[in-house]
Amino acid sequence: MLPMLNWTRTFVVAPLLIAGIASHAQQAQTAEQVIAAMRAAAQITPAPNTVDTIKEGDPQTVVTGIATTISPTMDVLRKAVAAGDNLIVTHEPSFYNHLDKTDLYPNDPVLAEKMKYIADHKLVIFRWHDGAHTRRPDFIMEGWKAKVGWVDAHRDPGGPMLYTAKPVTVAVLAEQLRKATGATIVRVIGDPKLVVTKIAYAPGAPGADRQIKTLERDDVEVLVGGEIPEWETISYVWDAKQQGRHKALILMGHYTSEEPGMKTVADWLKTTLPGMKVDFIPAGEPYWLAR
């Protein structure tokens, strides 16, 4: 005699299973849809001249996973492919110039190999630069706060982030930041024995005008930034030191100064796009120190 089936349980489980499959199917999104969702969640309307566009790949590609990074280097692309991520969200350019123009280097073998790898693996490269900075709070600055432990830091509207530290020498501060970020090279201009408490953070390459105006402030003794040509802000702080002024500059490198922010973007995406696979893939530091 056959056992009686639990028909009630059978008919309850089946619809739930079907609903689960349908829900999973609904999660499939194209790169274009994911980017639109990112902008909507961050409450950002891109400006007409924004650099935040798809640089390579088909916008209709169904996203299998997202990789955020500071720069889509070859190693980052390889790691993304290995992880099953086909939408690369990068903060910095992919093709060696701000506007990602690929016609600047015709027949260049390095560019050609990178473009072929992207095409062969059906990757989509999207730049998230203006949006990362426009969103409030700024993704990049929030990432830095978390990375170096400046939990009480605050940002001036449209200006640098300010942090008040316990009295510390410039040399010790630079070493603290080096250890926190894992940087190989940190360049310091100013008296290493200068004791400071008033610190400003302006990452990337905002330009000498903004950097020097920050250093002019009475509430800034040391500026922590990314990079600048040596004949600009570096020369300014060099002169300030030789005049005996209470100013110093710590340059972390462009990527090092902003990369933590792209981890913050990855963490945000995991809550913004539930069910979507999201990875942060650090590019790391391009420099090594000759000894």
Image: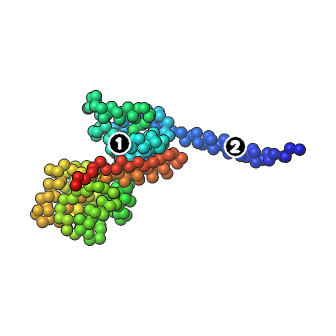
**The quarter of the displayed image where residue 114 is located:** top left
Please tell me which residue is depicted at 58% across the width and 39% down the height of the picture. Answer: 25
Q: Residue furthest bottom?
A: 167
Q: Residue 253 location in percent, x, y?
A: 27, 52
For label 1, count other residues whose C-alpha is less than 10 Å away and answer few (under 14), some (14-19) or many (20+): some
For label 2, count other residues whose C-alpha is less than 10 Å away and answer few (under 14), some (14-19) or many (20+): few
Task: Let me know if residue 138 appears in the view.
Answer: no
Q: Secondary structure at mark 1?
A: loop
Q: Residue furthest right?
A: 1
Tell me which amino acid carries mark 2: Pro
The residue wearing badge 1 is 73
Tell me which amino acid carries mark 1: Thr
The residue wearing badge 2 is 15
Q: Residue 18 location in percent, x, y?
A: 66, 41
Q: Residue furthest left?
A: 243
- 121 sits to left or right of 171: right
Q: Residue 126 location in percent, x, y?
A: 39, 40
Please tell me which residue is depicted at 14% across the width and 65% down the height of the picture. Answer: 245
**Which of the marked residues, 2 or 1, is nearer the chain's N terminus?**
2
**The quarter of the displayed image where residue 79 is located:** top left
Q: Secondary structure at mark 2?
A: helix
Please tell me which residue is depicted at 42% across the width and 49% down the height of the picture. Answer: 280
